[in-house]
Image (tube, rainbow, N blue to C red):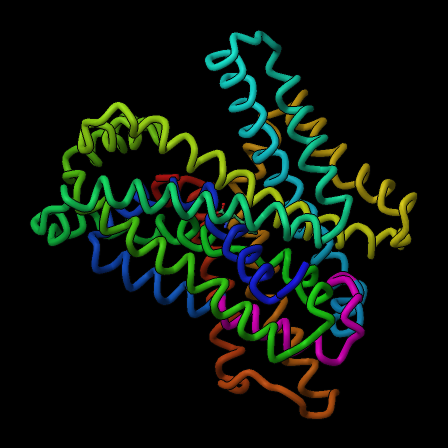
């Protein structure tokens, strides 16, 4: 692939803009738009910062090293174990969610568009084989397919925004938060929406460890989702009135409730199709990025070779477990996703700050992210806060709005 920098920006942005975005408006409804905007900026800055910390740490490694091995070097076996556990927990659960969501869409579309009847499990298997094939083939093929899908995803997003923006009313945007405690509960949803960090090592490897380009990739790759999310917040919070959101929350009708509300706002039969297309593309691009990250992680962990038979073995390790979960125990990964913010907080906040701290103590000074030890400390504390909030939700101390 020519211009790997551009392709990598799209892989990062494509992985980031995913299912989390759809959950955002409901989580944000209790915030009021001002708090939501502040939260978006703060989380973007945080997540972009820690991706740069990972780039900083990677300068002192061979660019092919997996994150598990890097964690071992700086944080010992315990660090490696926690990293590996969080990585597998998060990335397997996300992959299972993506294959099951995409599989369902394949099955229902083949039925409605081509009158082809097939069982749900067949759609899941078809998607896993095709998507898994692309990932096993290599990062270049992920790059190629992702460019097409990401471009299409942006087109559909622009159409949705264009349909909704004329219905935005100032008074909806000015309404104040309903309940302050909801703001805390929104944090894990917003936080997870900015996640892509499991794929950082794959991008480092793809770019041959070029620090200058990697910095551009992670800054722009995370800024694209920020812009998309800001516009999405304005469109949804501005056009759907607060009472509707309160209804969605009270009935717990989640995504379907949101889609109904959007349909009522736009009053066009095409909304359904456009929203469906956007959602499918969001699933597919996030799948590619996440599965790529998981694949490279497992190849490093199990020391599989980078040749055909090695990649096939890694492919089986990557896709069989999520496939089994999606087919036989969907409850398992849905439950795991409830803790996604905790695993992500370990991977994207605690781990990068701890590793950068250690690396600065032992390595010669090369590129160093600004902010010094105080910034690392703040990142670490943010990580603890996210984990605390998520546990609070899990144990019903805080309302669950996901
Ligand atoms: N940001 C992705 C989820 C994700 C989290 C962590 C790593 C990769 C992906 C989404 O909103 O769907």
Front residue of 70/240: it is 240
**Residue 2 horizontal/vertical position (percent):** 65, 62
Instruction: Reply above or below: 344 against 328.
Output: below
The residue most toward the bottom is 365
Q: Is residue 66 magenta?
A: yes
Residue drawn where x is 9% and y is 51% of the image: 170
**Residue 158 horizontal/vertical position (percent):** 33, 47
Which quadrant: the C terminus? top left
Residue 291 placement, left or right of 172: right
Residue drawn where x is 40% and y is 40% of the image: 396
Instruction: Reply above or below: 141 against 373.
Output: above
**Residue 328 horizontal/vertical position (percent):** 68, 20
Front residue of 43/394: it is 43
Residue 149 placement, left or right of 362: left
Q: Which picture quadrant has residue 248?
A: top left
Residue drawn where x is 36% and y is 33% of the image: 275
Give the residues drawn in magenta, as a range. 48-68
Residue 175 placement, left or right of 218: left
């Amino acid at each position: 692939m020519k211009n790997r920098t551009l392709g990598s920006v799209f892989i990062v942005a494509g992985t980031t803009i995913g299912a989390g975005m759809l959950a955002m408006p409901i989580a944000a409804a209790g915030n009021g738009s001002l708090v939501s905007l502040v939260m978006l900026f703060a989380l973007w800055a945080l997540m972009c910062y820690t991706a740069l910390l990972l780039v900083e740490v990677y300068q002192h490694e061979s660019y092919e090293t997996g994150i598990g091995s890097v964690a071992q070097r700086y944080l010992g076996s315990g660090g490696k174990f926690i990293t590996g556990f969080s990585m597998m927990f998060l990335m397997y659960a996300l992959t299972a969610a993506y294959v099951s969501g995409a599989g369902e869409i394949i099955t229902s579309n083949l039925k409605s568009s081509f009158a082809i009847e097939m069982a749900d499990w067949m759609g899941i298997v078809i998607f896993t084989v095709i998507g898994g094939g692309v990932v096993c083939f290599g990062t270049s093929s992920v790059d190629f397919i992702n460019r097409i899908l990401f471009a299409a995803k942006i087109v559909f997003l622009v159409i949705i925004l264009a349909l909704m923006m004329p219905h935005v009313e100032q008074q909806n945007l000015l309404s104040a938060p309903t309940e302050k405690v909801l703001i805390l509960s929104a944090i894990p949803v917003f936080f997870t929406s900015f996640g892509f960090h499991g794929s950082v090592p794959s991008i480092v490897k793809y770019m041959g460890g070029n620090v200058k380009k990697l910095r551009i990739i992670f800054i722009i790759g995370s800024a694209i989702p920020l812009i998309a999310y800001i516009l999405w917040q304005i469109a949804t919070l501005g056009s759907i009135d607060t009472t509707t959101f309160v209804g969605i929350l009270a009935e717990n009708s989640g995504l379907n409730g949101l889609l109904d509300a959007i349909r009522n706002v736009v009053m066009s039969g095409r909304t359904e199709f456009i929203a469906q297309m956007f959602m499918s593309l969001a699933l597919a691009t996030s799948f590619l990025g996440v599965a790529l990250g998981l694949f490279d992680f497992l190849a490093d962990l199990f020391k599989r070779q980078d040749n055909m038979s090695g990649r096939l073995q890694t492919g089986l390790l990557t896709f069989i477990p999520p496939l089994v979960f999606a087919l036989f125990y969907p409850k398992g990964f849905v439950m795991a996703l409830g803790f996604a913010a905790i695993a992500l907080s370990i991977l994207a906040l605690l781990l990068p700050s701890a590793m950068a701290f250690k690396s600065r103590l032992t390595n010669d000074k090369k590129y160093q992210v600004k902010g010094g030890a105080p910034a690392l400390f703040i990142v670490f504390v943010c990580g603890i806060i996210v984990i605390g909030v998520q546990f609070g939700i899990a144990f019903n101390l805080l309302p669950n709005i996901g």
